[in-house]
Image (spheres, rainbow, N blue to C red):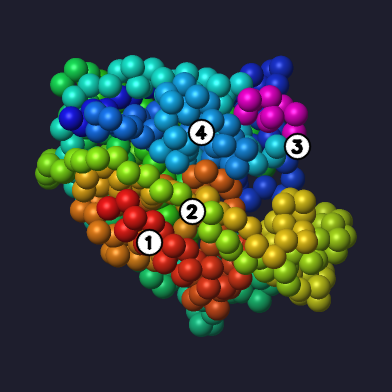
Amino acid sequence: MFKSGFARCVITPDIKNCPVPLAGLGRMDIRISNAVLRDITATAVVISDGEDCAVLISVETLYAGDLFSAKIRRAVSERLSVPEKNITVSGTHTHCSVAVEEVSNPNVRRWIDENAVKIGETAKKAYDALSETELYGASVQTDGINSVRRYKYADGEITSSVSTGRVNTSGEVAHESEGDREMLVLRFKRRGGRDIIMVNFQTHPTGDGDMSQGIYRVSPQTFGRTREVFESRYPDVDYVYFNGAAGNIDVKGPMPEKKFEQGEPYDNEFIKYVNEALLKAEPIKTGKIKAETYMAPAEINHTRADLYDKAWELRLIWRNDKSENHKDAYRAFDENGFRSIQQVMSCIRNEDKLKGQRYADLYLSAISAGDVSFVSVPYEMFAESGAQVKKASPFKMTMIFSNANGAWKYIPTKEAYDHGGFEPDVSFFLPGTGEKLVKDLTELNEKVR
């Protein structure tokens, strides 16, 4: 008998006594929280086949970093007596929340320790709320709210980001590809509790707050706000969002650059597609819960990782450069094998994590329950790769959770490396890694069928 349970907790840091660095927005130096726009939360959905159970956790952070997700899985496992492979933790990709990867910061470590325990207790509440459930699902193709972050300029140059920072980039921008526009929605119709609406979408949120004025806010931003809007309109359901393949996706239309409320048109458009999916949802066959994990070796690009010491020097050149559009700094980058300030900062932030290593082990996960599977990756998967995983999947519905169980930034496609741009510039891994991981994830899906 298939059952599900739901619980949510607030994990907003005490920024007065314990200010934390914020993630996202391409920060070149640490941004420190100085205001709370909306509380950030963590949501636990527990599913059970009557014998075994799995726990799906969505946290309103950019990533679910290595340490944070490991501590959460341990806390949940201890409270529910569930194997850790049956637990996955995904970040919603908010760009205004705790930078969980900055574990050297004592306030971040304190926040991680405290909230891993709290989330473990929340998962226990979800488990205690298990009730008999019928599962329904559908997908819809969206239009006008997402597009591939792949740009072709008037001079014929193609990059994977309009903000690549190259001095010679000019001309009007046109989108080269539309990527994966699929939104997946599951409805857990519970006999003994409120229905659960689970949304999985391949989009990349922008930031909230005016950086030029130093307004660095803690906020669920974009999808946390969408959740609030949805639940205010439909008070009898609980809503949870899992971010999908995000590496080359950006949002069309109004977004909250300076004011929170500017995202309202996007909220309405997003929820319109959720409603469309719910109207066409059909029964999803449930079955025995299966789970598998794989530590996938990914080869590090040491033509980049060997430049750590030079990166510190180049960062100072950037900060002191008064030339137009930082032309002098970019010239220094080119001479030393770098293409952008983001690449320089990427090397600096991951010196201890990568230096001297040939491979990094990436935690891949697949959990299934009948005709649906949940695949988790610890990085931002390009939409083309996510679409390939779903196309090869033996399941009726496959949800992809990105930035889950780790924080390894982007893993682009081979094509994106050829074109260049932000994501390939800051990726730690060699071209071909994305294609290998698609194969690994496909094999994991087959194992849990």
- Counting residues from the start of the chain, the first of labels 1 and 4 encountered is 4
Q: Which residue is mark 3?
A: 104
Instruction: Report the mark closest to the observer, 1 or 3.
Output: 1
Amino acid on which the number 4 mark rests in the picture: Arg
SS at mark 4 in the image: helix
338 left or right of 158 in image: right
SS at mark 2 in the image: strand
- Counting residues from the start of the chain, the first of labels 2 and 4 encountered is 4
Point out residue 138 in the picture as x, y percentages from the top left corner: 19, 47
Point out residue 67 in the picture as x, y percentages from the top left corner: 62, 38
- Counting residues from the start of the chain, the first of labels 4 and 3 encountered is 4
Please report the residue visible at 73 percent of the width from the left and 72 percent of the height from the top. Answer: 303
In this rendering, does residue 165 appear at all? no
SS at mark 1 in the image: helix
- Counting residues from the start of the chain, the first of labels 1 and 3 encountered is 3
Write down the region rendered in magenta. Answer: 104-113
65 relative to 344, above or below: above
Please state which of residues 101 and 251 is positioned toward the viewer in this rendering. 101
